[in-house]
Structures are given as C-alpha cells and as structure tokens.
C-alpha cells in the first residue's frame, strides 16, 4: 500500500511538472490593438480582432495562437471603399465573415519569433509564416509583426488592377496576463 | 464692380457657412455624428467665403469677356462646378478612427451647394446693378 502511494505521488508530480512545461502562458488581448493593411491605393484597419494567445517566450514550441479578424469591421476611412471591400468582388464578408489564423509551430528566429500556421481568408486556407516580436512591458506585453500577403493567393479581387497584388499587413497586439 | 462682387461674395459666403453649421447641428441631432474635426467651424467658413470670393473673381473676369451674357453663363458654370465637386466628399478618406464614415457624404454633399445657393439668393437683392 505504502509503495502504491509513493508510486502514485511520484506519477502525479511528474505529470504536474510535465504539464507545467507544456502549458504556455495564456494572454488576454488588450483593447488598443492595431490590425492594419496598406498598399499603393488603399489602406485601413480591421477593428475587431479576437482569439486565444498562449505564449511563453522561454518555450515557444509549447505556445499557440488561434485568432480571428472580423471582415465586416474593415475600415478604410471611406464608406464607398468599405462597402466595396466587403462585397463579393473582394472579401465577400457575408459568405466569409472572418479571417482565421491557427498556429502550428512557433520558433525563435533571430531577435524575434516566427509562427507557422494556417491562414484562412475568403474560404482559402494556406500555410503561412509570420515573423513577430514579443516585447514585455510591466505586467503586459506587445506582439508586433509586419508581413506581406498576396491577395491573389486567397482569390481576393481580380489580379492586377488599381490595387497592388501584395498587401502589407502590420499587426500590433498589446496583451495582459 | 469688383468691390461690390467681393462684398456679395463675403456676405453670401457667411450666409452659406451659417446654413452649413445649422445643417451640421441638425445632422448631429438626427444621425448622432457631425464629423466636427473634419468639418470644423473654421474650415466651413473658410471654404464658403473662400469659394465665393473665387466665384466673384470668376464673375468679374467673365463679365469682361461676355458682357451681357455673364449672369447666365456664370450661373451655369457655378452650378456645374458645384456638381462636379461632389466627387470630393464621396472619395474623401476620413481618419481611421472616425465612426460611421458612411454618414459623411450625407453631411458634406448638401453643404457643397450652400455657397452657390447663397450667391444666387443674394445676388438679385444685393447687387442688382452688377
């Protein structure tokens, strides 16, 4: 009986240590995030960004992101452009209401990190790698990243035309524990 | 003649600016937004008075060329230019933190017509002999 108790206790302790190593810190998304995009012709932001962020800078392999952007929250500063962007010619917000990103692998890359995951826009899912930085400040931190998305990869709009094919995306997400 | 035209421009511009401000207040009451940062009191007065001063100079120059047909041609041109200017508020890009940008044209477009309206309203009363 005594041996069983010691064995069970050891097992629990090992499981707890193992679990502690696996689980990354959950971060709560702050209100002042910025999900911006720009190209030669248009620029703007998405105003609604949600999801779960579990990140441990010491253990990026155990970290994961699952975030969505509300397509209908697009804001270019011009009502006509907003309407156009939400239409079936571009994002088709009625049929594809969210942009979804789920991480598969997070690794340290130079001074920052790199996340590889599935990016789903306009009903097209593709593996996509995003470089990002993680800067701690007090009890919170900020994730930031800049990358390019080729809209043709996701069948957004027609290739060529006034709007450039490659859109620059800038993300800054403050988080708290 | 130019002096009278400039006085007409200033008075009708001020009248247009007051009308625009009244319309902005009504719009705020009805729609809840007035875009006061973009369409501020200073900018409204500058645009209305400035626009009508340009119109006065245009009228003066036209009168030198057209003589008796100035009024008809000028009014047509003023109306056409005002109509063409509708492009500006429709294509205008607001700051990204502006709420409900779809309501901006509904506020700005009618304001565009106020300077021409002010000019055409006051011209017969104010400067009959121009």
Image (spheres, coloured by chain):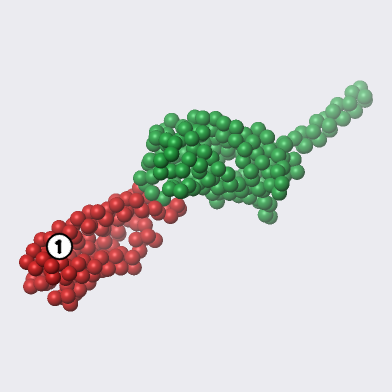
Q: Is residue B73 left or right of residue A66?
A: left
Q: Residue furthest bottom?
A: B3
Corner quadrant of residue A65: top right
Residue drawn 74% across and 40% down?
A59
Per the rendering, the colour in which chain A appears is green
Residue A57, image quadrant: top right
Left or right of B26 on screen, residue A44: right
Mark 1, Cα crowd under 10 Å, few <14 / some 14-19 / many 20+, is some
Residue found 54% across the figure and 37% down from its top: A68
Q: Residue furthest right?
A: A2
Image colour for chain B is red
Q: What x and y, as percent, mark residue A22?
A: 75, 35
Percent of width and height locating residue A166: 51, 42
Residue behind mark 1: B74
Quadrant (top left, top right, bottom left, bottom right) of the N terminus of chain B:
bottom left
Q: Is residue A114 visible?
A: yes
Q: Relative to residue A108, is residue B8 drawn left or right?
A: left
Host chain of mark 1: B
Residue B12 can be seen in this image: no
x, y (%) of residue B109?
A: 27, 54
Q: Residue at x 89, y 23 (%)?
A: A4
């Amino acid at each position: 009986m005594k041996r069983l108790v010691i064995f069970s206790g050891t097992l629990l302790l090992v499981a707890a240590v193992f679990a502690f190593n696996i689980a990354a810190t959950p971060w709560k998304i702050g209100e002042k995030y910025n999900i911006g995009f720009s190209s030669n012709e248009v620029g703007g932001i998405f105003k609604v960004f949600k999801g779960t962020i579990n990140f441990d800078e010491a253990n990026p392999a155990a970290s994961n992101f699952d975030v969505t952007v509300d397509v209908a929250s697009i804001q270019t500063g011009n009502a006509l452009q907003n309407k156009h962007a939400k239409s079936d010619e571009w994002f088709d917000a009625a049929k594809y209401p969210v942009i979804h990103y789920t991480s598969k692998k997070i690794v340290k890359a130079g001074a920052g990190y790199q996340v590889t995951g599935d990016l789903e826009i306009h009903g097209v899912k593709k593996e996509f790698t995003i470089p990002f930085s993680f800067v701690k400040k007090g009890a919170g931190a900020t994730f930031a990243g800049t990358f390019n998305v080729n809209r043709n990869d996701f069948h957004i709009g027609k290739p060529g035309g006034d709007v450039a094919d490659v859109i620059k995306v800038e993300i800054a997400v403050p988080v708290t524990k | 003649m130019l002096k009278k035209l400039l006085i007409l421009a200033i008075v009708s511009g001020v009248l247009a600016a007051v009308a625009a401000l009244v319309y902005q207040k009504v719009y705020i009451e009805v729609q809840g937004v007035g875009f006061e940062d973009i369409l501020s009191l200073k900018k409204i007065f500058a645009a209305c008075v400035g626009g009508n001063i340009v119109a006065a100079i245009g009228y003066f120059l036209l009168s030198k060329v057209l003589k008796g047909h100035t009024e008809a041609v000028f009014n047509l041109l003023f109306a056409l230019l005002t109509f063409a200017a509708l492009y500006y508020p429709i294509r205008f890009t607001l700051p990204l933190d502006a709420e409900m940008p779809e309501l901006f044209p509904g506020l700005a477009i009618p304001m565009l017509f106020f300077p021409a309206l002010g000019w055409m309203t006051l011209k017969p009363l104010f400067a009959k002999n121009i």
